[in-house]
């Protein structure tokens, strides 16, 4: 039985939305990788802005931390949405990517703050502990894993 015309359009739109979301995810991963590995400490526009702004470094850092805070808030929003979804049927790759989110966000943030000797370094271990708890729960609780996906592949 063929789907109703409205169902077919809705299915195509959902598929298109999924592909666009995947492209956005790949973009964010690529951008993050560039910032972590390839970007020089200061770009020419950074130096220009620092030298031109009346308050220099402080104004520039306010802008940088505004962007960084926005990225953190965006990850938080995405995780809230994911937490509303059923974990039943998560594939191994899905679990791996979710746990990679923790490694790339909380673990890297905590590590960097320990290297810097930040006053907030100990508080930043809380999200690391939560990611570890999430990983242990998802990997150990067979009720949130499909039976066909348990075990080595």
Image: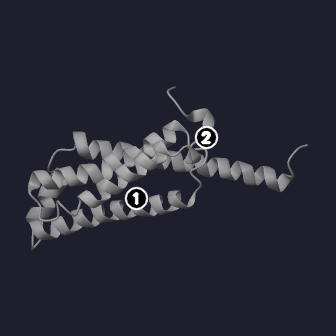
Residue found at x 53% / y 50%: 21
Local secondary structure at mark 1: helix
Q: Position of residue 128 (x, y in %)?
A: 30, 54
Question: Would residue 7 appear left or right of 22 to someone viewing this image?
Answer: right
Local secondary structure at mark 2: loop
Question: Would residue 6 appear left or right of 31 to someone viewing this image?
Answer: right
Q: How many marks?
A: 2
- Density class for disc 1 (Cα within 10 Å; few <14, some 14-19, many ≥20) is some
Of all residues shown, which one is farthest toward the bottom?
54
Tell me the distance, in whole angstroms, between the alpha carbons under discs 1 and 2. 26 Å
Question: Would residue 100 appear left or right of 37 to someone viewing this image?
Answer: right
Q: Position of residue 8 (x, y in %)?
A: 79, 49
Which dot marks residue 121?
Answer: none
- Density class for disc 2 (Cα within 10 Å; few <14, some 14-19, many ≥20) is some
Front position in the image: 34 or 135: 135
Residue to which mark 2 is pinned: 146
- Label 1 vs label 2, nearer the camera: 2
Front position in the image: 97 or 86: 86
Of all residues shown, which one is farthest toward the right?
1
Residue found at x 28% / y 42%: 34
Residue to which mark 1 is pinned: 75
């Amino acid at each position: 039985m063929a789907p109703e015309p409205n169902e077919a359009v809705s299915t195509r739109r959902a598929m298109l939305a999924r592909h666009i979301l995947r492209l956005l995810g790949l973009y964010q991963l690529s951008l993050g990788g560039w910032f972590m590995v390839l970007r020089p400490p200061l770009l020419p526009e950074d130096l220009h802005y620092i030298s031109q702004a009346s308050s220099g470094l402080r104004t520039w850092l306010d802008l940088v931390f505004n962007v960084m805070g926005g990225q953190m808030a965006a990850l938080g929003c995405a995780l809230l949405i994911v937490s509303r979804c059923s974990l039943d049927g998560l594939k191994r790759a899905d679990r791996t990517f979710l746990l990679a989110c923790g490694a790339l966000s909380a673990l890297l943030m905590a590590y960097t703050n320990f290297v810097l000797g930040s006053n907030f370094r100990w508080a930043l271990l809380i999200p690391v502990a939560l990611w570890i708890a999430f990983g242990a729960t998802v990997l150990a609780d067979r009720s949130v894993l499909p039976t066909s996906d348990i075990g080595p592949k």
